[in-house]
Image (spheres, rainbow, N blue to C red):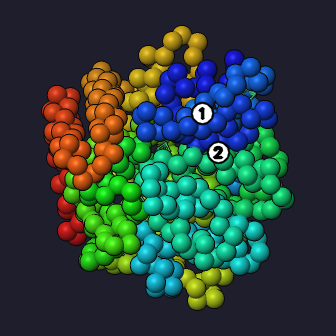
Amino acid sequence: MNNVVEKVLPFDYCCGCGVCSAVCPHGCLEMKLGENGEYRPVSLDPSQCTSCGLCLQVCPYSGEVPENEETLGLQLFPEGKKEHSDNLGQWDETFCGATNDEEHRLKAPSGGLATSLLCALLESHKIDGAIVAKPSLESPWFQPTIAYTPEEIRQTTGSVYHVMTFGPVLREILQGPEKRYAIVALPCVVKALRLAQKKLPRLKDRLPFIFSLTCGGCNCLHVADLLCVMLRSRKLGLKYRSKTNSTKSPDFRITTFSQQDERQVRMLGLFGFLWINHVGQLKTCGMCDDLFGMLADATFMDAWLEDYFLEPRGTNLIITRNPEITELVKSEIARGAVSAETINPELVMKSQEVAMNERAYLSALRYDYEKTHRPEGSIMPCKRDLITQRTLTKEEKKEAVRRLRFHQQTRKYLAKMSRYHSNPDHFYPRIYVYRVFWKVLCSLIRNGLLEKTLHSLKFAKDKRNK
Ligand SMILES: Cc1cc2nc3c(=O)[nH]c(=O)nc-3n(C[C@H](O)[C@H](O)[C@H](O)COP(=O)(O)OP(=O)(O)OC[C@H]3O[C@@H](n4cnc5c(N)ncnc54)[C@H](O)[C@@H]3O)c2cc1C
Ligand code: SF4
Ligand code: SF4
Ligand code: SF4
């Protein structure tokens, strides 16, 4: 069969976006949560597949379509272009600011501007609904859902740092009545959506606005399970970013909560240790070359800049690529709903400097590793020259193997632990959490990565203290 299950899954490069399952004309694919804590398409009835190849043409990892973020970006935003940058892609304007709705700002991960602009699109009747991440009180804690009112949109504020799949919601908008929607998604999902829009004009008409979040990496669901065991609460809500009691913007808390109580850990503590080491991150994140969501109409991120560290209420940076969104930001400023001003794009890049440099290096390593280890004739995911043309030394190639091995080992520990966590108040799951940390530490030492971790932790600490 000429489909994603046969051609993409064997290499395990799939971000679980679910776009393939939504576009399949015969409904052959369904997204399922696998043992590794990630969503994967499964063939419900292989005899239904006609090998039409549509799923491969929308998959960002199949390499079936010779389009990378650079070429697609130029097709999407030709006239909005003021300048081009390898990292930001085409950009029309860059802003820094926050919502003036104080209550919402305190609940939002950054300055609450993604939510503000979705509400503005809805209130100005440019869309009928927005696809956002709706929280729930049990695993998988968040599901992409359509919000039809500003109040519903505001209830979904937050950053979801673990996997979600968009297959069912996309099928709903494709098969439902003719309406217009906006969606918020991570850059890899945005690429799949743009590829799908090229093939399905109906998806283009019904999804006129695509927002992206700058993405430093996303975790498998086992990491969320681990957090809940650490906080001894499983069947409860999970909020990755709470601003309670913090005096500096990067010093936020992860909270689990119920009607009765809530428990918190600091992001820069043990969870930060896992995050810095990419423990539990998707394999696709290791080969990702799009930090800034280059194909989105607008991208939202934190203002990780010295001037804003001391603003605990949080501040956003936005890159707009679609001039219609640039105008929307300006009209929201004029109306007094938002406080924002334009900012030099160099500062936008500076705010993500560490992630940007690390991403360019790591993805080149992983790409090279894949190229040399895939069976002859296999197609590679389509990446930019920035990644594919980088010359690597022998030592760097060894580093790629060390990092991949570390990633595989730690994913195995997490998957194993997730089998024991059903009752977080129970003794064994908690013992298992300590075992996971111990094993991560041993793997770091074995793979010679400990020194780099200590360096990263020191950087995070310095950033917090600034
Ligand atoms: C996995 C991940 C990694 C990130 N990495 C970085 C980083 O390295 N640097 C940085 O500056 N910022 C990063 N961000 C973005 C940052 O955390 C904020 O989401 C962003 O600044 C928007 O803030 P806001 O206050 O405007 O959000 P809000 O106004 O709360 O709006 C956010 C919207 O996004 C939706 N949403 C949340 N998570 C997801 C998701 N995973 N997929 C789809 N929709 C979602 C919410 O439902 C909400 O509608 C990351 C976000 C995620 C989810
Ligand atoms: S090849 Fe065509 S029919 Fe087969 S799963 Fe993919 S989209 Fe569906
Ligand atoms: S389209 Fe998305 S879900 Fe489907 S195989 Fe590709 S990455 Fe995975
Ligand atoms: S780092 Fe890249 S591949 Fe990973 S979730 Fe973010 S956008 Fe997707």
Residue 53: quarter of image: top right
Where residue 311 appears, x then y in whole percent?
34, 78
Above or below, comparing residue 93 to residue 380 in the picture:
below
Q: Nearer the viewer, residue 407 or 400?
A: 407
Callout 1–callout 2 Cβ contact below 8 Å: yes
Residue 69: quarter of image: top right
Q: Amino acid at mark 2?
A: Gly
Where residue 286 appears, x then y in whole percent?
41, 37
Q: CA distance from mark 1 to mark 2?
A: 9 Å
Q: Quadrant of the N terminus?
A: top right
Above or below, comparing residue 118 to residue 234 in the picture:
below
The number of discs equals 2
- Mark 1: give few (<14), some (14-19) or many (20+) Cα within 10 Å: many
Which residue was labeled with disc 1? 41
Which residue was labeled with disc 2? 167
> The residue tagged with tag 2: helix, strand or loop?
helix
- Mark 2: give few (<14), some (14-19) or many (20+) Cα within 10 Å: many
Q: Is mark 1 within 8 Å of ligand 3?
A: yes
Where residue 466 appears, x then y in whole percent?
22, 70
